[in-house]
Image: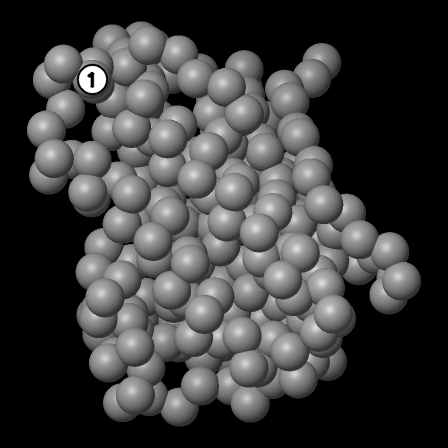
Amino acid sequence: MATHVITGAGSGIGAAVARELLERGDTLHLLARDAGRARQLAQEFDGAHTLVGDLAEPERLSWAFEHQTLPEDVDSLLHIAGVVELGTVGDFGPKLWNETLAANLVAPAELTRLLLPQLRRARGHVVFVNSGAGLRTNPEWAAYSASKHGLKALADGLRGEEAGNGVRVTSVYPGRTATPMQEKVHRQEGKEYDPSRWIPAQAVATTILTALDLPRGAEVTDLSVKPGG
């Protein structure tokens, strides 16, 4: 029975992954931004544990964890949460840049740092759910894409640093996926949202589990997932 720490379990890809792992009988620790959200996650995912820490304030994660019981070993740390705001470089001020980078890049780095001892003991696996925007960008996507390009660099650096400790690191790059975040993006773009056009969240969850289930001795470093017929 493996132990997993998951961010973003409240909806979309994260929820699909959490349900699959619970059905296996694994132990889950779901990160919630506050105590109220933690109670909601505990009700939604019966048997799962919760941790409270706000990814919007990565500098406070260490303090928050000092007041909670962390798992002794972590077989996988799954970074699935993220935020997106579209806008031009000319319109985006420091506040939006800082909020985007904090949640999408600095928080995953800090959460990984805080759980590295447990990951090393378990010879665990860190999965960063990135985005197609982490490999390329378009107008009005600069801030989000910059955070995801940075996340790729974080994953690549971590992989090299922790290989000797047996920690595997995978980046997953989904294209547009049928999630509440995608619905929000369509509103910002002024477009009609049709979830049937995009990747099912369950398909991305299956991709993540495929990487986790790879036998020891091999490592998937990068996986791109695109909408298909």
In the picture of the structure, the residue carrying the numbered disc 1 is 89
- x and y, in percent, of residue 195 in the image: 48, 22
Identify the residue at image location x=29%, y=28%: 143
Residue 218 located left or right of residue 118: right
Q: Position of residue 72 (x, y in %)?
A: 55, 89
Amino acid carrying mark 1 in the image? Val
Asked if residue 126 is positioned above or below residue 198 in the image, the reply reads below
Viewer can see residue 206: no
| Quadrant including the N terminus | bottom right
The answer to whether 224 is drawn above or below residue 86 in the figure is below
- Image quarter of residue 7: bottom left
Which of the 4 image quadrants contains residue 40? bottom left
- Quadrant in which residue 168 is drawn: bottom right
* Residue 139 position within the rendered picture, expressed as x and y whole percent measured from the top left: 33, 10
> Which residue lies at the image location 27% right of the left edge and 50% below the top edge?
102
Give percent across and percent down for residue 92: 14, 24
Q: What colour scheme does the image use?
A: one colour
90 left or right of 100? left
| Between 146 and 184, the one nearer to me in the picture | 146
